């Protein structure tokens, strides 16, 4: 019995989630830059995160017609707490510290470490599968990011100390840990996960900024900044979590690495910035990398262990269980369900149902 078309459909949907997340996040950078020209970088980061957290909490309350418990299993709370600590607190603070002690060009180049570290952790620590095609695709996307962020012309803005680059590298490591820990809870409510991370990151960064003497922003800057944060950080993170659910950390991280290119494209289209040869070269590398990932085919005989979890699903080969009530065939629904052991052979990806070793 095969579920190849179903798995491919799931993968394609997850790729759309990942690229949409990258597009929203990439768009937020040039837009926030325009709005926050006079705002402290730490405070700007805090407001963007705060907009995401507050916005997603409101959306979740509207969806559930009031506040409802997270439904997160007891064993997943440490993973979420770790993701919030590394991704929402340590990462942003380390980046802002690093930016004060290194050049913007150096920092932009070093931020390309995040997908590399995400993939290395996913492969080495969390045992995600990877073949040469996936590795080559990830490297092509990263080369595109390096080309896009490579400094042009002469600059006197050089690194002031070795502490700056180390802090930026540490921020990348924090976000790599965050990506892999978030993968562990990606089957749970994505609105709750993303909203929690946004609220904590927003409160921490705003507190740090105000403690360091930053001035609060006027309402005409605050409102659009919070809105950009909701879309570019909040909705983007929800889509990122949904992509993690279907693709795993390494592949999602690779797709998300196209964010700088998509941000540059939006700057060209919306803000009228000039197009350089480096932009088209970066586009070629990234499109090649995405194509390698999209055309991946990974299939072998594998064993599913017993599993109990809650997520939105339709009845397919991996979801054959009875209901108390009647659920029309093909209808997506969410509830706690149990997976019986099963052994079969079909194309698959390291999603929430395929986390076996190779």
Image (cartoon, helix red, strand yellow):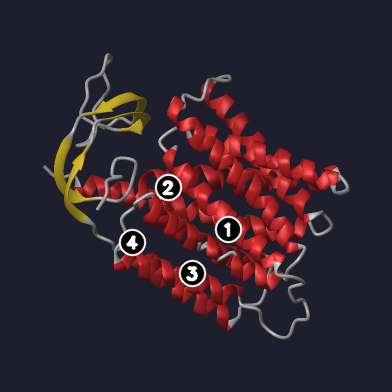
Marks 4 and 1 close (CB-CB < 8 Å): no
Distance between the Cα atoms at labels 2 and 4?
Answer: 14 Å
Q: N-terminal of the two: label 3 or label 4?
A: 3
Distance between the Cα atoms at labels 3 and 2?
Answer: 19 Å
Residue beneath disc 3: 142
| Relative to 337, residue 100 above or below | below
View extreme (front): residue: 162
Q: N-terminal of the two: label 1 or label 3?
A: 3
Is disc 4 surrounded by few (<14), some (14 to 19) or many (20+) residues within 10 Å? Answer: some
Q: Give the residue drawn at x 58%, y 31%.
A: 59
Is disc 3 surrounded by few (<14), some (14 to 19) or many (20+) residues within 10 Å? Answer: many
Is disc 1 surrounded by few (<14), some (14 to 19) or many (20+) residues within 10 Å? Answer: many
Q: N-terminal of the two: label 1 or label 2?
A: 1
Describe the element under mark 2 as helix, strand or loop. Answer: helix
Q: Nearer the viewer, residue 269 or 118?
A: 118
Distance between the Cα atoms at labels 3 and 4?
Answer: 16 Å
In the image, residue 96 lies at what x, y percent? 72, 56
Residue beneath disc 2: 243
**Of circles 4 and 1, which is in front?**
1
Is disc 2 surrounded by few (<14), some (14 to 19) or many (20+) residues within 10 Å? Answer: many
Q: Is residue 323 left or right of residue 151?
A: left
Q: N-terminal of the two: label 3 or label 2?
A: 3
View extreme (left): residue: 1
Q: Is residue 71 left or right of residue 354?
A: right
In the image, residue 17 lies at what x, y percent? 44, 49
Q: Quadrant of residue 23?
A: bottom right
Could one spot residue 26 in this view of the protein? no
| Relative to 243, residue 62 above or below | above
In the image, residue 260 lies at what x, y percent? 57, 64
Describe the element under mark 1 as helix, strand or loop. Answer: helix
Could one spot residue 303 in this view of the protein? yes
């Amino acid at each position: 019995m095969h579920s190849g078309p179903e798995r491919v459909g799931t993968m394609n949907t997850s790729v759309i989630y990942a690229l949409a997340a990258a597009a929203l996040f990439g768009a937020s950078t040039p837009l926030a830059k325009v709005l926050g020209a006079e705002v402290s970088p730490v405070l700007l980061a805090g407001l963007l995160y705060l907009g995401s957290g507050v916005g997603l909490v409101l959306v979740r309350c509207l969806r559930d017609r009031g506040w409802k418990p997270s439904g997160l299993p007891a064993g997943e709370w440490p993973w979420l707490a770790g993701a919030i600590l590394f991704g929402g607190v340590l990462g942003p603070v380390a980046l802002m510290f690093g930016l004060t002690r290194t050049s913007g060009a150096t920092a932009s180049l070093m931020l390309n470490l995040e997908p590399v570290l995400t993939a290395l952790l996913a492969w080495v620590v969390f045992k995600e599968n990877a073949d040469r095609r996936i590795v080559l695709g990830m490297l092509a996307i990263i080369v595109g990011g390096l080309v896009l962020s490579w400094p042009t012309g002469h600059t006197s803005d050089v690194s002031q100390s070795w502490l700056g680059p180390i802090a930026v590298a540490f921020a990348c490591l924090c976000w790599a840990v965050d990506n892999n820990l978030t993968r562990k809870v990606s089957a749970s409510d994505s609105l709750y996960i993303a909203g929690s991370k946004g609220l904590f990151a927003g409160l921490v960064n705003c507190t740090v900024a105000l403690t360091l003497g930053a001035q609060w922003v006027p309402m005409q800057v605050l409102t659009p900044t919070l809105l950009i944060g909701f879309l570019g950080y909040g909705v983007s993170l929800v889509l990122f979590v949904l992509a993690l659910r279907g693709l795993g950390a390494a592949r999602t991280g690779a797709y998300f690495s196209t964010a700088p290119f998509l941000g540059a494209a939006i700057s060209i289209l919306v803000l009228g910035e000039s197009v350089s040869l480096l932009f088209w070269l970066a586009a070629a590398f990234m499109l090649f990398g995405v194509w390698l990932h999209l055309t991946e085919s990974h299939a072998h005989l594998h064993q599913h262990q017993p599993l109990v979890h809650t997520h939105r699903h339709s009845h397919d080969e991996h979801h054959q269980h009875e209901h108390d009530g009647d659920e029309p065939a093909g209808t997506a629904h969410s509830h706690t369900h149990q997976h019986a052991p099963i052994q079969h052979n079909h194309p698959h990806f390291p999603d929430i149902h395929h986390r076996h070793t190779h």
